[in-house]
Amino acid sequence: MIWTLLFAGLVIGSNNFAAAVAIGALGGKKYWLKIISVFGIFEFIVPLIGVWLGEQLSGYIGSLANILSALILAGLAAVSFYSAAQPPKIDQKILARITSIRGLILLELGLSLDNLIAGFGLGIGESELPPLLLAAIIAFFSVTYTFIGLTIGHKLAKNKKWQNYAQFGAGILLLILAVLVWFELL
C-alpha cells in the first residue's frame, strides 16, 4: 500500500512542477515561501474533498466505480498530452500577477482541479488508500515539485521547452494510474 500511496502522490502532485517553473522564471525568491505554502495547503485539502465526493457517489455508481475512476484518470492524462502538444508560452505580466496571494489562490484553484477529480476518481473506486495519508503525500510531493520547479525556473528562465516535457510526463503517469485502477491494482 505504501508504494501505491507514493505513486499516487507522485502522479497527482506533479502538475505543480510546470507552474512552479513558470513562476520561478520571474525570479523574486522572497515570494517562494508564500507560493509553496499556498500550493501545499490546496494540494492537501482538495484531494480530500474529491475523495469525499467520490465516496458519497460510489453507492450510486455501483459496479462501474473502478471503470469510471480509470476513465477519469485517463481523461486527465489526455488533457496533459494535449497541453504537452501546445506551444509553450509565458506572459510576464500574468506571471507578475500570479505571485500575489489572490493570483496564487486562483492559480492553485486551477491546478488543483485535477486533484479534485483524481481524488473523486479514487473515492469512487474500491481503493483502500487512507484519505488523510493520501492528501498528506500529495501535498508533500506538490510542495517538493513546487520548490524544485521554482529553482529550475529561476535558473532556466530563457528556455520554456521544459513545459511540454513536464506535461507529457504527467500524462504518462496519470495513464499508468488509470490502468492500475482499471485492473483493480490500486
Image (cartoon, grey):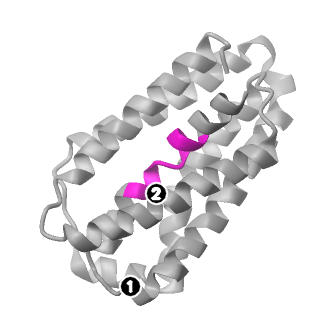
Answer with left or right where residue 103 lies relative to residue 83: right
Residue plotted at (53% across, 49% down): 13
Residue at numbered disc 1? 29
Total numbered circles = 2
Amino acid at circle 1? Lys
Residue 62, above or below 121? above
Counting from the top left corner in percent of width and height, residue 175 is at: 45, 25
Answer with left or right where residue 19 lies relative to residue 93: right
Question: Secondary structure beneath disc 1?
Answer: helix
13 magenta-colored: yes
Residue 159, above or below 186? below
149 magenta-colored: no
> Tag on residue 122?
none
Segment colored magenta: 9-17
Amino acid at circle 2? Tyr
Mark 1 residue crowding within 10 angstroms, few (<14) / some (14–19) / many (20+): few
Residue at numbered disc 2? 145
Counting from the top left corner in percent of width and height, residue 32 is at: 46, 80
Query: Which of pointers 2 and 1 lies earlier in the amino acid sequence?
Result: 1
Dominant SS in magenta: helix
Quadrant where the C terminus sits is: top right
**Residue 105 lies in what quarter of the image?**
bottom right
Counting from the top left corner in percent of width and height, residue 143 is at: 54, 62
Residue plotted at (73% across, 27% down): 1
Question: Secondary structure beneath disc 2?
Answer: helix
